[in-house]
Image: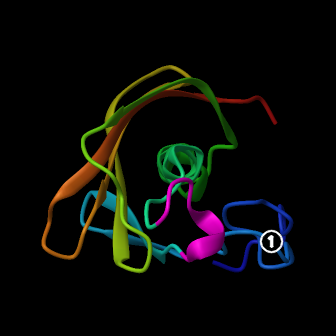
């Protein structure tokens, strides 16, 4: 995206040696990243740690308004884990805008397997910060 800021972000920063290095694309009215967790991302054997799943959802939901030009921070985050998220399978992380009022965005997101099975879903309130 040509954004030279935040290069040490844990979720998306290219300079963070232990980061997730997510790369994003706008697909229709959704913001999407693909990620395959390795054994270093697991909690129980073969299952992605819930904190990593939460990070994926937080990042996709807070970053979409950022990509549209608003510097944003997460004000509230709610995650529903629907089933264990497996290590070693490509995940599609999607986020979209549900509504916007002033500087407040209401966001939603999912983590899904290649067959479309949703393993986790999130809701977030994201606030644009003053520049």
| 9 horizontally vs 20: left or right | right
Say if the magenta span includes residue 2.
no
**Helix, strand or loop for disc 1:** loop
Residue situated in front as seen by the camera: 131 or 53: 53
Residue beneath the point at 66% across and 70% down: 40
- Which of the 4 image quadrants contains residue 2? bottom right
Counting from the top left corner in percent of width and height, residue 82 is at 24, 41
Q: Is residue 22 visible?
A: no
User: In front here: 74 or 52?
Assistant: 52
- Give the percent coordinates (x, y) of residue 42: 56, 61
Q: Count of labels shown?
A: 1
Q: Which residues are magenta?
A: 38-45
Quarter of the C terminus within the rendering: top right
Query: Which residue, given by chain and number where applicable, does mark 1 sit on?
Result: 18
* Quarter in which the N terminus is drawn: bottom right
Residue farthest along the front direction in this orientation: 45
């Amino acid at each position: 995206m040509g954004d030279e800021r935040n290069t040490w972000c844990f979720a998306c920063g290219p300079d963070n040696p232990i980061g997730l290095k997510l790369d994003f694309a706008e697909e229709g009215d959704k913001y999407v990243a693909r990620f395959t967790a390795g054994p270093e991302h697991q909690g129980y054997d073969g299952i992605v740690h819930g904190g990593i799943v939460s990070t994926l959802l937080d990042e996709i939901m807070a970053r979409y308004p950022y990509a549209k030009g608003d510097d944003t921070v997460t004000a509230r985050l709610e995650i529903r884990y629907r089933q264990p998220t497996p290590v070693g399978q490509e995940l599609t992380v999607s986020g979209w805008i549900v509504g916007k009022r002033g500087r407040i965005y209401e966001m939603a997101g999912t983590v899904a397997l290649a067959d479309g099975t949703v393993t986790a879903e999130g809701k977030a309130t994201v606030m644009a910060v003053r520049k």
